[in-house]
Amino acid sequence: MMEAAFLTALLAIAALLGLIALSFPISIALLTVGSVGLVLTRSWLYGETQLLLNFMDQAQNFTLLAIPLYLLMGQLVFRTGLASDLYACIYRWIGRLPGGLAVASVIASAGFGAVSGGSAGTVATLGPMCMPEMRRFNYDGGLAAASIAVSGTLAILIPPSIFMIAYGIWTETSIGALFMAGIVPGIVMTIAFSAVIVVWLILRPEMGPVGERFTWGERFTSLTKLLPILILFGIIIGGIYGGIFDPTEAGAIGVCGVLVIAGVMRRLTLTAIRESLHGTLQTGLMIFMVIFGGHVVSRFLVLTDVTSAIVSGMQSLDLGPYTLLVLVTLLYIVLGMVLDVWAMLILTIPFVFPVMISAGFDPVWFGVYVIIMAELCAITPPIGLNVYIMARIAPDISAGAIFWRVVPFFVAVLACLVLFTAFPEIVLWLPHLAYR
């Protein structure tokens, strides 16, 4: 049984990788493999019925509504210029530090991630804003681009995170607890990325001269534009923490809040609304199709007893939990070199999640771990989507040059993982406090 299960899993993964290599969208690849697997395992009628039932089940899933709501909130923040206010404010306060402009991009990415939930969108939004300013002060191009590409990954860890919502749906883990769990690690990793830049620029000051000087009046004035977004984030997280509303309702409140803020500031135009809705629809449909396809593949794997067989097989090896964690970390690093974030999560979670939970890891802690490994996927060559977005924004800088500058940040992420593993309460303290 064990050999047959592994063979089935290998064939399914090989088929998925083959379709992805042929440039099929990940959602189509998942649906194809899952559907064909169901038909071959049972019958055409069974496969057709499962597809219909799965689609109806996902369509009625209230939690999924959170995804387009948070996407729309991020789009509105970008289209109405609130993201620009965020960067401008941070720049005025820390621009004079060693590497201050690059550190400002890191903190701005963390802040924008708190209202957007997506990594690639954060890089595409902040890249055109941050890059020209760093160029103006003669920052090393590779360092400037790398700092933006890396800091964009914070958006999928700091709540609200689209990937946390997807993980919560796939594993039936509390999304509210996941949101709470992402806050402290997100702050720690923001500090870690900032520290890498500051130390780097202290050692090599010619790679990033300090920015221009601002008066205290200009600094405090910039805070007034940032205050509404801070209040909105506080309402969203505070409401979830206090049990006033769930993550989906928080998304709706967030959208209404951005509309009110932009309206009061006279930035809400029909063009901004239209472009925000278009961007939300485009990204949201892709995510929905990926989640739908992932459920179909999971159903096929459960039907063939692949998941239970792999869990039993791993348990029979009698590996310690931390040995297992090291092996899974190496697996994710390797997969991050050949797969994008969604493909990696879809392929691994059905197998890895039950194995890690059976080894004694907390599902909320493991969710944060998986999200951090997904961050690495976004900056790991040769796929590293965030790096290629920056290479497109700054075409005179090669992707290879950016990847080299990413290495110290990559090491910082692994160091943070070691810290969170040694002291899991860094991750679990806040959700335990909120959901005790």
Image (cartoon, helix red, strand yellow):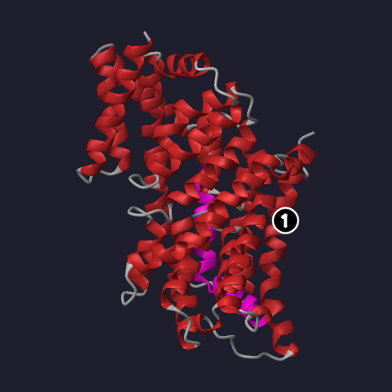
- Dominant SS type (magenta): helix
Q: How many marks?
A: 1
Camera-side residue of 168 and 74: 168
In the rendered image, the quadrant that contains the C terminus is top right
Q: Which residues are magenta?
A: 64-92
In the rendered image, the residue lying farthest to the left is: 22
Between 277 and 413, the one nearer to me in the picture:
413
Q: Taking 25 as reference, is 356 above or below it? A: above
* Percent x, y of residue 221: 71, 84
Taking the magenta stretch, the answer to whether it contains residue 249 is no
Identify the residue position indicated by label 1 in the image: 235
Amino acid of disc 1: Ile
Report x, y in % for residue 107: 61, 67
Residue under the image location 72 percent in, 63 percent down: 231
**Is residue 265 shown left or right of residue 408?**
right
Residue drawn at the location 54% of the way across and 29% of the way down: 324
At mark 1, the secondary structure is helix
Placement of the N terminus among the 4 image quadrants:
top left
Which residue is nearer to you in this view: 436 or 231?
A: 436
Q: Is residue 110 visible?
A: yes
Residue 356 placement (x, y as % from top left): 56, 27
> In the image, 17: left or right of 322?
left
Seen from this angle, which residue lies furthest top? 1
